[in-house]
Amino acid sequence: MVKQTYLNRNINIDIIKGLLIFLVVIGHVLLGSLKENIIRYVIYSFHMPIFLFISGYLVNTKALKESSLVLLFKKYLFRLIIPWVIAVFVYSLIENRQDIFHNIFRIFYRPYYHLWYVPSILAFVFSVFFLMKIKIKIELVLILFIPLTYILNYIYVSPGVNKYIHSELISILSYLFRPQYYLYFVLGIFIKKHLNVIGSVRFRYLIIAGGIFLLLNIFLFYVNDNLNKKLTAFTFIVQNILFALFAIKFITGNSQYFVRKKIGVFISWLGRESLGVYLWHVLPILLVKHIIISNYYLFTTLSLIIFLIIIKLMDKYKFSRQYFLGKL
C-alpha cells in the first residue's frame, strides 16, 4: 500500500491534522454559542474527538510499554509541557492581569479557554502507560468507556443533570481532562492494533453513515427534550466513531487528491504545525476583540494570516521552535 511521505512522514496524517486544526481555528473565530451558531456546533461536534482519535492512533504503544515514567516525562517536557506552561502564562497575563499572581495555581488547573487540550492528552498518554504496566488490555478499556462516554455526553448536554454536580474536584477534573473524549483516544490505539477490522469498509459508506448521524445529532441537539438529549449522547458517539474510521481509511490509503494541489501543501503544513497553531491562534482573535469594534471577521482573518506568517518565521529559529512550538 502506497503512502505519501514527507521526511518519513505520512502526509495523509498531516492533511487530516491540518483540516482539523483549521476547523479548530474557524470554530474559535465564529461568534455566538453553539445553540446560536449551527456551523459552530457542527465543527464542535467532531473536531476534538477526531483530533484525539488521531493522537491515540499515533501513540507508539511498543515504545510506551518499554518506557519508564521518567523517560516518558522527559519525552513530553519540551514537546508539550513547556510550550503549554508558557502559553498559560501569556494568556493569563492578557486576560487576567490583576489576578494572575494571586491565583498562580488556578491558571494551571483552570487554564484559559482552549488550553485544556494539552493536560488532556498528557493524562490520556500517561493513563495508557500505567494501564499497560499493569497489563490491562486496551480492548477492555474501550468496552468500559463506551457506556461511560454515553453517560458523560448525556450530562454535558443536560444542564438539568449537570447542576446537581457540585463537587469542585469533579468540576476541575472534567474541565482539565475532558474524560468524555478518552474513548476516542483509546479507539485510535485499538484501531492501529486492529487495522484489518476496517480493511474492507468503503469510504463512501463511512461518510454517508457519518453524515446521517451528524444530521440526526444536529436535529436532536436543537430540540429541547429530555429523550432527545439521551439520543444526542448516543448519536454523538456513533457519528464520531464513523468519522474516525473514515479518517483512518484516508490515512492508510494512497489518495493523492490533496497532495497534488496547492491547498494540500498548505493544509499539510498546518498539520505539521498543529501544536503551535493550536496554542497561539487565539492571540490574534483576542487582539481583534479587544482593539477593533467593527468588521470583526475581516480584521480577524487578516490578523490570522499575519499570525501564520509569524508561525512560519518562528519555525526558523531553534529557541522559538522549541519553547513556543514544541518542536525539537
Image (cartoon, helix red, strand yellow):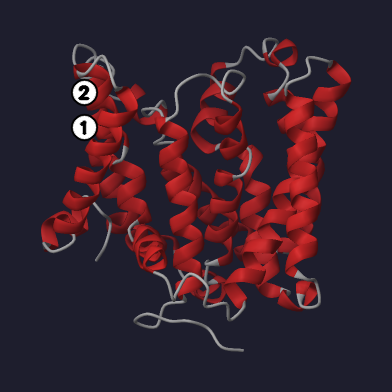
Residue, x 39% and y 83% (percent of image)? 8
Residue, x 32% and y 43% (percent of image)? 279
Residue, x 52% and y 28% (percent of image)? 175
Would you name the residue on which mark 1 appears?
90
Amino acid type at image mark 2: Ile
* Residue 87 placement: quadrant: top left
Residue 50, given in percent of the width and then of the height, sits at: 59, 52
Depth check: 178 or 132 in front?
A: 178
The 10 Å Cα crowd at callout 1, few under 14, some 14 to 19, many 20 or more, is some
The 10 Å Cα crowd at callout 2, few under 14, some 14 to 19, many 20 or more, is few
SS for dot 2: helix
Whether residue 134 can be seen here: no
Depth check: 154 or 45 in front?
A: 45
The tag on residue 94 is 2
- Measure the alpha-carbon separation of dots 1 and 2: 6 Å
The reply to whether discs 1 and 2 touch (Cβ–Cβ < 8 Å) is: yes
> Image check: 264 left or right of 286?
right
Above-or-below relation of 233 to 208: above
The tag on residue 10 is none
Q: Quadrant of the N terminus?
A: bottom right
* Residue 163 placement: quadrant: top right
SS for dot 1: helix
